[in-house]
Amino acid sequence: MAEEQAASQEQPQQQFAMQRIYVKDISFESPQSPAVFKQKWTPQVNVDLNSRSNKIDDDGNFEVVLTITITAKIDDKPAFLCEVQQAGIFLVKGIEGEDLRRVLGIAGPNILFPYAREALDSLCLKGSFPAVMLAPVNFEALYQQALQQAASGEQEATH
């Protein structure tokens, strides 16, 4: 029993906590307004998703930034371009290496996504367009895909 307590005291307790959520950058453009409102609303919509993280202090605080860019075009002309950089500060302790990258690449964006989706919907509505209503995103699958792409890129570079 004493050995178990000593072992648990040696391993730092893992901690992941949200400290703050905020909009880092936000943009909306509708270059074809008001002519775009006279056209039938049948847009081709493209959604780009990206996330990044960086350590911001020596106390275990990390910033995670989720960037979502939506481009809507009608007949290859831009109807609108909307971009949100939703950010958060997360306290992470006792997690290192690949586990740290995984937490910052999956858990952080999962927490930020609903806030970014709401900001994008609001911007589109304020621009007099329908809300975008983004579907949920599997950030774990995206993270695994990025790892596989990085690994295949390294293999190609060594051959």
Image (spheres, grey):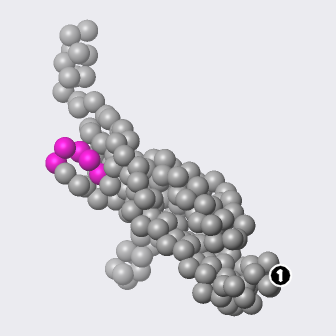
Tell me the kind of residue under disc 1. Answer: Lys
Q: Residues within 10 Å of mark 1 (few under 14, many from 20)?
A: few
Residue placed at 72% from the left, 88% from the top? 35
Q: Residue furthest left?
A: 58
Note whether 106 is above or below 16 in the view shown: below
Q: Quadrant of the N terminus?
A: top left
User: Can residue 72 be seen in this snapshot?
Assistant: yes
Task: Please say whether residue 48 is one of the residues in the magenta stretch.
Answer: no
Query: Which residue in the protein does label 1 denote?
Result: 40
Q: Residue furthest right?
A: 40
In the foreground, 35 or 69? 35
Note whether 9 is above or below 99 in the view shown: above
Residue placed at 63% from the left, 61% from the top? 121
Q: For the residue labelled by badge 1, is the local secondary structure a helix, a strand or a loop?
A: loop
Image quarter of residue 64: bottom left
Q: Residue furthest top?
A: 1
68 with respect to 124 (left or right): left
Residue placed at 19% from the left, 44% from the top? 59
User: Can residue 99 be seen in this snapshot?
Assistant: no
Which stretch is magenta?
58-62
In the foreground, 156 or 135? 135
Note whether 17 is above or below 2 in the view shown: below
60 with respect to 99 (left or right): left
Pinpoint residue 49: horizontal percent, then vertical percent: 52, 67
7 with respect to 19 (left or right): left
Pinpoint residue 94: horizontal percent, then vertical percent: 26, 38
